């Protein structure tokens, strides 16, 4: 379980790097994070869609503050793809960042008009909702095969 937490710390570091101009200089974005990890000693029990049985999980809630801003290509538009050269050539939009749609996303900090940007692979998916001028509003990570789920939502900005 410690390795999963370290992977999420690495993921968060990569997912919240710095780019696009933020609305207010030096703004602090406060996120509420929810982590759910398959754990034989976990206090919760869930049905696993992958194996068709109940498994134990540990749930963790936390808050974190970010002052960074993602480094996305400008201007973003639906259908845009970036990443490694060979991965961009794939027709299935996997193993590359792909702007899927523009949609409204409601999180504790409010409702934002966002680009939904996905990075999908065979073992997992990372989906980010990005609002220009604000930053990342929501992140979801889902692992296929075991229950390892992570959601981070913008709680407020100060």
Image: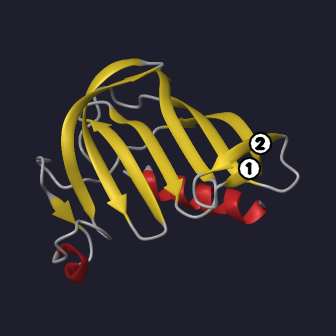
Q: Is residue 29 visible?
A: no
Badge 2 density bin: few <14, some 14–19, many ≥20, Cα 10 Å = some
- Element marked by disc 2: strand
Q: At 42% from the left edge and 54% from the top edge, which residue is drawn?
A: 126
Q: At 44% from the left edge and 18% from the top edge, which residue is drawn?
A: 109
Camera-near label (1 vs 2) is 1
Furthest residue toward right:
41
Q: Give residue 7's quadrant in the image.
A: bottom right
Q: Is residue 146 above or below residue 75?
A: below
Q: Which mark is residue 45?
A: 2
Please state which of residues 99 and 47 is positioned toward the viewer in this rendering: 47
The answer to whether the residue labelled 1 contacts the one labelled 2, judged by CB atoms less than 8 Å apart, is yes
Q: Which mark is residue 76?
A: none
Q: Give residue 147's quadrant in the image.
A: bottom right
Position of the N terminus, as image quadrant, is bottom right
Badge 1 density bin: few <14, some 14–19, many ≥20, Cα 10 Å = few
Q: Which residue is mark 1?
A: 54
């Amino acid at each position: 379980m410690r390795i999963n937490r370290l992977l999420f710390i690495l993921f968060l570091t990569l997912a919240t790097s710095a780019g696009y101009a933020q609305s207010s200089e030096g703004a602090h974005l406060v996120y509420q994070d929810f982590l759910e990890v398959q754990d034989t000693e976990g206090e919760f029990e869930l049905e696993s869609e992958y194996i068709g049985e109940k498994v134990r999980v540990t749930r963790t809630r936390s808050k974190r503050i970010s002052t960074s801003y993602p480094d996305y290509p400008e201007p973003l538009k639906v259908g845009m793809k970036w990443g490694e050269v060979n991965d961009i050539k794939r027709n299935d939009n996997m193993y590359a960042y792909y702007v899927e749609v523009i949609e409204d996303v409601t999180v504790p900090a409010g409702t934002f008009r966002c680009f939904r940007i996905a990075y999908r692979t065979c073992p997992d998916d990372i989906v980010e909702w990005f609002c220009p001028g604000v930053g990342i509003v929501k992140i979801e990570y889902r692992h296929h095969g075991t229950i390892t789920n992570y959601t981070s939502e913008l709680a407020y900005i100060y």
